[in-house]
Amino acid sequence: MATTRNYEPDLYPGDATDRWTEQKERAEDYERSADSYGYQPRRAKRVDEWMEVEFKFGGSRIKRKAVALVLLGGPALVPLFFCLPALFTLDSNTFSVAVDDVLGTGAELCLFLCLLISPLMTLTGQRWFFPLRRWYGIMMACCGIGDAVAAGLTDTFSGGFFAKLTEHTFTLVGLIMVMLVIPLLITGNKWAQRKLGRYWKLLHRLIYVIWGLLAIHLLTLFGFQPDIQVGGAGDGDIIFHQRFYQYSACSIFLLTLRLPPVKRWIAARQREGRDWLVVLTITPIFALFVFGMVFLINEEIFKGIDMFNNTPSAE
Amino acid sequence: MSETYARRRQEPTNAGGFMLAAISVLATIAVIAGLVYATGVGARRKALLAAGDCAPVPGLVVTGLDCTTEQQLAGEYTKITTPAVQQLNADVAAYTASERHDLAAAESALMAQVTLAQALDKSLMRFPFPAAVAPQAKALMQAIDVRVKLTAEQARSSSLGQLRSFNSRIQTASAAVRTDMKLVRKALYTRPTADQEP
């Protein structure tokens, strides 16, 4: 009997909705190549196999997949890289002004990238980029914890470290998110996965709680109406720079592709060979996702470069 | 495969299609609305600039080209002062090294300080300080002037003893410059206080 768990079982589990899928459906409903991310077309399998091929580089042999993963995973280090000059020079002014944006936005980006892996696996059927989910998750945790530590040490709010992190609703929500991400970071390895067994998956569903708390964090920090955006209207794109808009635009795609009926519908269409229908329906949602991500990335680069030059931009 | 089982399978599959279609339609509307909204960026930008609004919000196209934010201004200020201060420190070190045994070298180091400080003063005079920072900037330029005059007078000394007699006054003037520089930098970088934050 085919299993729905035949892909890299020692890595991350599927989404929170996978259990529902497993209970309602039998594995033989799908073709033999199906796993928890749905039907895997033959061409997707071929891509996975192509990625597994090794090539010679210097004196060693490297998998194509490894190179692709490094190239795709490397940008997740950029938010931390932006902070290095301020860290080496212990420039508390730069940290105080810009760290919230650079590391906070960096953590948000890494969270969305982490959550993007499963939908992409559902859509493309390819599995080779699966390890990126853990990597982006780790980087999200590092950025989030760094943000909280820097905010507690250098923010201009009154009081000590914990007072600064609990003084306002948005800082309190941010602190809760960081507290939740710590166990995920600690247990984000194979050893913890073995030790925790089935509880590991349950624990790691906290990522969805963090995803929800991020909405509260952004709403309490920046509000919802564009005209109360901190710092004013800037370049005239007040809505696109609205943080909750960016969050919503990105989350709609990530959430939709996690809904079990939607996943089943996509798998069914792919099985029928009607990929064009999947592409047609997903494209507008993905375009919305790109719309949100573009402005998030732009914000990260803009603020990050300013921070790197020790000329930080506030909101 | 039984008919009941087949029906059970069919229902959620269709439900997924309807859900996806509905979300897709909404997303299409949102994307089109976004594109339409984006076409008005230029006009909104002009209106904002006419109203004097200039906030440090990153723009995909135009930020920094036609509008200098306070943060960018602070960055420009740092770009002017940091190399000047570093060079001044080097000249002061050169003076200290020769103040006890080489009058000519010491005077040369002092003249280098005078030239550099005058150039810094000129740069600061041209700098578009915001109105809120103008008093501190004026105080800084006055402090630099005082130090320049004192250093020039010191450079005209005819002996090493006379040269060193200026040291304490120079140090006091330097301390005033440093304090004013810090005040200006702080004023330029000032961010909202805790109760101004949302």
Image: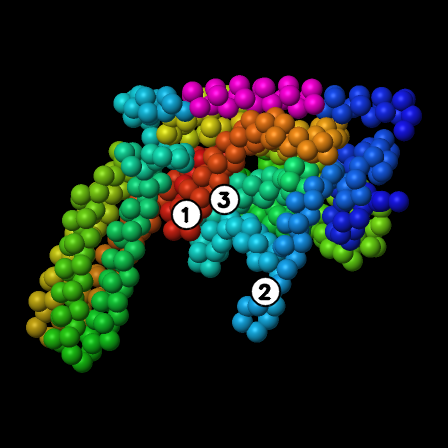
The answer, for residue B146, to whether it is visible in the render is no
Magenta-drawn segment? B17-37
Whichever of callouts 3 and 2 sits on the residue coming sooner in the sequence is 2
Q: On the image, which quarter does residue B131 sit in?
A: top left
Between the residue at mark 3 and the residue at mark 2, the CA separation in whole angstroms equals: 37 Å
* Residue at 63% in and 54% down: A50
- Seen from the viewer's position, the closer of residues A49 and B104 is A49
Which residue type does callout 2 highlight? Phe
Residue bearing mark 2 = A55
Front position in the image: B132 or A159: B132
Q: Nearer the viewer, mark 3 or mark 2?
A: 2
- A259 or A28: nearer the viewer: A28
Q: Which residue corresponds to mark 3?
A: A102
Chain at numbered mark 1: A
Residue position for label 1: A305
Percent position (x, y) of residue B161?
Answer: 15, 74
What secondary structure do most residues of the magenta stretch adopt?
helix
**Residue B91 seen:** yes
Mark 3 crowdedness (10 Å alpha carbons): few <14, some 14-19, many ≥20 = many
Distance between the alpha carbons at the discs numbered 1 and 2 = 36 Å
Front-lying residue, B48 or A91: B48
Q: Is residue A80 magenta?
A: no
Determine whether label 3 and label 2 are within 8 Å by CB: no
Callout 2 crowding tier (Cα within 10 Å): few <14, some 14–19, many ≥20 = few
